[in-house]
């Protein structure tokens, strides 16, 4: 892990999110049909690029959780506010990284929000600043994970979870819908119209800023 502080950890994460937003927006523009503008890429290619941008953003989210957790466990405080009260006091960052790995595992998983919240309660009083924030945004984070898995894997069970998410959010399941196409679908009843990818990335930034207030 780079020797960062919590401010630079948050800044790096937001920078990656902005890159994902920009990359996806450019792909949308390249595939758009407007008067006087000929698309330079297909909609299929746009969707593929969008999935890549989303996956890159989710991986950055996992890295943000791990890095901020280890820095808090090492005694750092956020740019604004107090450091959480620790139950454990590792002498350095490397040992802090070792301590968060579950017994019998090679590494800690940061994909499932509730697991991270449970881990936080073992190391910090009330699980701060993770438990309440992650559990309060459980639905959003579960949807992000389902989409991440649907991009990264092609199993039947993963596809089924993605299709259930789509039905819950849209009320219907369009035929042959890809994750990229879903992400560019407007959220029903959103005013002004807002695509799912915009909403998801905005929400995950909001959650990160609650974990590391600046």
Image (cartoon, grey):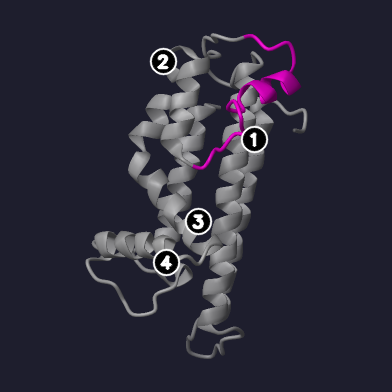
Label 2: which residue?
126
Q: Dividing the picture into quarters, in which one does residue 65 lie?
A: top right
| Magenta-span inclusion, residue 90 | yes
Q: Which residues are magenta?
A: 89-111
SS of the residue under disc 3:
helix
Q: Position of residue 146 (x, y in %)?
A: 43, 54
Image position of 51 with respect to 35: above or below: above
Q: Nearer the viewer, residue 191 or 166?
A: 166
Q: Position of residue 140 (x, y in %)?
A: 37, 46
User: Do tag 2 and tag 1 residues touch (Cβ < 8 Å)?
Assistant: no
Quote the CA–CA distance across marks 3 and 1.
19 Å
Q: Residues within 10 Å of mark 1 (few under 14, many from 20)?
A: few
Q: Residues within 10 Å of mark 2 (few under 14, many from 20)?
A: some
Q: Please tell me which of labels 2 and 1 falls first in the chain.
A: 1
Quote the CA–CA distance across marks 2 and 4.
38 Å
SS of the residue under disc 1:
loop
Quote the CA–CA distance across marks 3 and 2.
29 Å
| Magenta-span inclusion, residue 149 | no
Q: Which residue is located at x 68 percent, y 24 percent?
A: 98
Q: Which mark is residue 148?
A: 3
Label 1: which residue?
107
Q: Position of residue 187 (x, y in %)?
A: 31, 62
Quote the CA–CA distance across marks 4 and 1.
27 Å
Q: Nearer the viewer, residue 87 or 58?
A: 87
Q: Please tell me which of labels 2 and 4 falls first in the chain.
A: 2
């Amino acid at each position: 892990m780079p020797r960062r502080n919590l401010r630079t950890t948050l800044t790096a994460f937001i920078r990656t999110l902005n890159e994902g937003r920009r990359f996806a927006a450019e792909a949308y523009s390249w595939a758009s049909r407007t008067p006087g503008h000929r698309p330079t890429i297909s909609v299929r290619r746009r969707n593929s690029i969008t999935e890549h941008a989303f996956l890159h953003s989710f991986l950055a989210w996992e890295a943000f959780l791990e890095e901020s957790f280890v820095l808090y466990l090492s005694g750092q405080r956020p740019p604004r506010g107090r450091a959480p009260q620790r139950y454990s006091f590792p002498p350095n960052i490397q040992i802090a990284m070792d301590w968060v790995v579950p017994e019998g595992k090679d590494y800690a998983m940061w994909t499932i929000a509730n697991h991270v919240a449970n881990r936080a309660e073992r190391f910090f009083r009330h699980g701060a600043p993770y438990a309440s924030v992650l559990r309060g945004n459980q639905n959003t984070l579960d949807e992000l994970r389902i989409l991440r898995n649907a991009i990264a894997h092609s199993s039947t069970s993963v596809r089924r979870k993605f299709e259930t998410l789509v039905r819950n959010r849209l009320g219907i399941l369009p035929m042959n819908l890809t994750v990229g196409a879903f992400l560019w679908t407007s959220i029903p009843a959103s005013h002004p119209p807002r695509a799912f990818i915009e909403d998801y990335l905005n929400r995950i930034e909001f959650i990160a800023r609650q974990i590391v207030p600046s």
